[in-house]
Amino acid sequence: MWVRSTMAYRTSFALTTIGNAAGSALDFVAVALMFSQVDTLGGFTVGEAALLYGTSSVALGVADLLLGSMDTLGGRIRDGTLDTLLVRPVPVFAQVAADRFALRRLGRVAQALVVLVWALTQVDVDWTVARVVWLPVMLVSGSLIFGAIWTLGGAFQFVAQDAAQVQNSFTYGGNNLLKYPPTIFARELVSGVTFVVPLAFVNWLPVLWLLGRDDPLGLPAWVDFLSPVVAVLMCGVAALAWRAGVRSYRSTGS
């Protein structure tokens, strides 16, 4: 329904999609400006930094396209309109994800893909079959991890009722963190996004293996390949949290 509504005004859709892409591109402009003053940042060249930017932004863009509407859940809980979703013969999760579905978010994905393709032409990587296969696996795993974090944030809103900004700090905020090399951050921060909120598995660790670099924490080499495992575990935890949140919902009482 939302897609049909959007496509009823095709010129508006095209302009908002382009605007979405342009707005996202400003983030990469900031990265490029840094490299206009230095040759490397934390030991990473501009092409390698662009690879981090592209992989993280594609993963976030896909998750945002599919689950970005989870931000509206807190409002529905506060005003009681979530009750309407509960009586429909469709899973609540699917309805919340589809609520005000914004197809214009494809602009973010397209812009990130352009940067990613450019980055792949700039980095010095021995493209074996394993590395070629690993790239899409990494992107899918990263999207699932971001999606799981969005779902966990939605589940938390059943308790907090207005936690959209907390949720965004881990999704959009995490994406801003992952755009830059892990070597420029404190060891404690890198440990936190590896073992506490496993954002490092979105792109830091997988990209380090692609580039043939050691990670700053000195972890075993096999840890770089755990992104799919972490994604599945995160989705499992998010599913349990979501189910618990829905079961705990008691409406507004009005």
Image: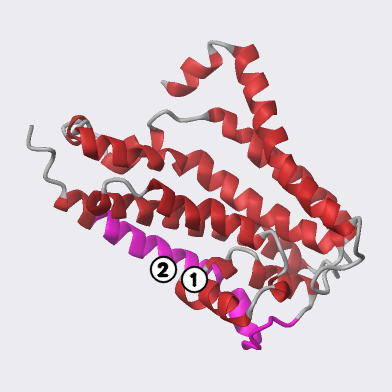
Q: Quadrant of residue 14?
A: top right
The quadrant of the rendering that contains the N terminus is top left
Name which residue lies at 64% across and 64% down. 203
> Which residue is pictured at 63% across the width and 85% down the height?
217
Do labels 1 and 2 touch, CB within 8 Å? yes
Mark linked to residue 233: 2
As drawn, is 252 to the left or to the right of 185? left
Q: Which mark is residue 87?
A: none
Judge from the rendering whether residue 53 lies leftward or rightward of residue 147; answer left or right. Answer: right
Q: Residue at x 72, y 53 (%)?
A: 54
Which quarter of the figure is the C terminus placed in? top left
- Could you tell me if residue 139 is visible in this image? no
Residue 176 in percent (x, y) is at 63, 56
Main secondary structure type of the part rendered in magenta: helix
Q: Nearer the viewer, residue 38 or 220?
A: 38
- Kindly tell me whether residue 216 is visible in this rendering: yes
- Reply yes or no: does residue 225 show up in magenta: yes
SS of the residue under disc 1:
helix
How crowded pointer 2 is (Cα within 10 Å; few <14, some 14-19, many 20+) is rated as some
- Side of 126 where 158 appears, left or right: left
Instruction: Indicate the position of residue 134 as horizontal and vertical percent values.
Output: 68, 65
Q: What residue did someone put label 1 on?
A: 229
